Amino acid sequence: MPFGVRDVVAAALGLPEETVRVIAGDVGGAFGAKLMTYPEQSVIAAVAMKLGRPVRWFEYRTENMVAMSQGRALVSDVGLGATREGKLVGLEVNTVADAGAYAGLAPPQLVLTSMLLPSVYDIPNVRFVGRSMFTNTAVMSAYRGAGRPEAIAIIERAMDMLAAELNVDPADLRRRNLIAGPFPHATPTGLNYDSGDYSRALDLALQAAGYDDLRNDQRARRERDERLQLGIGISSYVEMTAVLYTGESATATAQADGSMVISTGTTASGQGHETAYSQLASQLLGVSMDSIRVVQSDTALVKSGYGSSGSRSLQIGGSAVCRACIELVEKARQEAARRLEAAPDDIVRFDDGRFGVKGVPATALTWSELASEAAFVAESEFEQADQTFPFGCHVAVVEVDMETGDARLVRHVAVDDCGKVLNPLLVEGQIHGGVAQGIGQALYEEFVYDADGNPLTASFVDYGIPSIGEIPQVETVTMETPTPLNPLGAKGIGESGTIGSTPAVQNAVIDALSHLGVRHIDMPLHPMRVWEAIQKARSTGR
């Protein structure tokens, strides 16, 4: 969020905001940690001003592991009530969240968790008590999903445990309780789901995974008492995107050389904004993508902006770009009418992108000609009335080594609906990346402290993250249920992969051990923790 950093640095140094310039280069993923502003950013600027020369700052990985914000540190006690027929009647959750040593975003994230707890299910009564506690650990802040993955992890784990208690298939229990509409749908926690088709997402995921065949394979392995037992995990989810920051501005400029400049206040960190905005502008302006330059992430070149958070960029920034391009086309029609001495209503845009009088293509004008006297500029703002709610269903398939406790993900099916899809390849890339992080959270990632509170996790040598060898080919199925809240019909997709995948993988590992009576294992499900659950179940029968 360049403008957020600019404002903080300006305030810290006592400078007018317009005298501080922040440029966010192509630095790779952000995932929430770069949403924060850090003291070092102001300190570096102060030292540079004091010395009168450039100052470069870097930190070692060991420093980074404790200095940068972390996420997902909470413990929840969950009660899920249902009739004997499996109809949900109530959900009660008591959560204690580790906020870290200093104030971050842990408390407001609890609000997001509480609001999304009912998820895709028709639960008439929900009670949530959340407490955020200061501790001596690293600061907790937003991490891909920011409060929403926690909610889905809670309810999806509870759904599997309820299914085991009722002795019904987890898929059947979910199907009985899915919200069927109509939409918009008001939840007991105060949200209004804009659109959805949750039963179809579940059906598509089960069909793509070959769910019945997987269950047959699972039963056969158990009968043969094989070393590698199969587990199948399901996670139905809904999430909210464009949270809090629902407005954005954009500018579209036609230049004398025929090129276009699109600027907006969102900030790219690997999502493919340049491609998405260029594609959108190309379609609306009738020019090639190669002739379009996208400007963002620079407070000196962009009017204003909230950056990118909460999967807001396309639906908010893209909608602002859409409006700016439509306005620029209208300005081009007006200018063509003036130059050709025609009525604006008689001006059309021909297939080759030129503007001219209908039926008289010979006198039509190009963008370059229209902008020859001065650059054509159109500014627009877009404010979305509410957040949007992407949804989907993930199915994870794991093999668990009953002798070592090692869990290996062999398949992952992801059905995700982010509204109207502009670029399928970009959507698939976001899903793949999100699933990889979900796998990491479920199976590997953990920051460890000793009994005195000293951090023991110092680098990626002892902080487990999945490599390409641990991530199977993600089998994606895309649904499209457009939202009525923006002109693109788009919802966010940047965090859906993580939100859907994490509980699916956790459920799958526990499902592989369910015949032993194992009902729950806390994340991360690393081999020692899984092995201990197996040994306990074999010795006690549960």
Image (tube, helix red, strand yellow):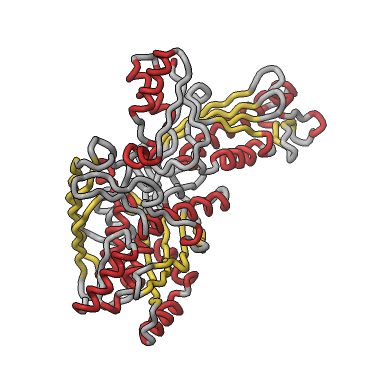
Q: Quadrant of the N terminus?
A: top left
User: Residue at left 65%, top 27%?
Assistant: 254
User: Residue at left 46%, top 61%?
Assistant: 470
Rendering coords of residue 324 (x, y %): 55, 31
Q: Quadrant of the C terminus?
A: bottom left
Residue 381 in view here: no
- Apparent side of residue 306 relative to residue 424 in the rendered image (left or right): left
User: Residue at left 35%, top 42%?
Assistant: 65
User: Residue at left 20%, top 71%?
Assistant: 83
Residue 527 in view here: yes
Q: Residue furthest right?
A: 362
Rendering coords of residue 186 (x, y %): 30, 52
Q: Nearer the viewer, residue 481 or 446?
A: 446
Q: Residue furthest bottom?
A: 223
- Apparent side of residue 450 relative to residue 244 in the rendered image (left or right): left
- Apparent side of residue 363 relative to residue 197 in the rendered image (left or right): right
Q: Nearer the viewer, residue 421 or 219?
A: 219
**Vertical order, 278 against 377 (above or below):** below
Rendering coords of residue 521 (x, y %): 27, 65
**Vertical order, 289 against 251 (above or below):** below
Q: Nearer the viewer, residue 181 or 230?
A: 230
Rendering coords of residue 262 (x, y %): 58, 31
Within the image, what quadrant is residue 55 found in? top left
Q: How many numbered circles does the render carry?
A: 0
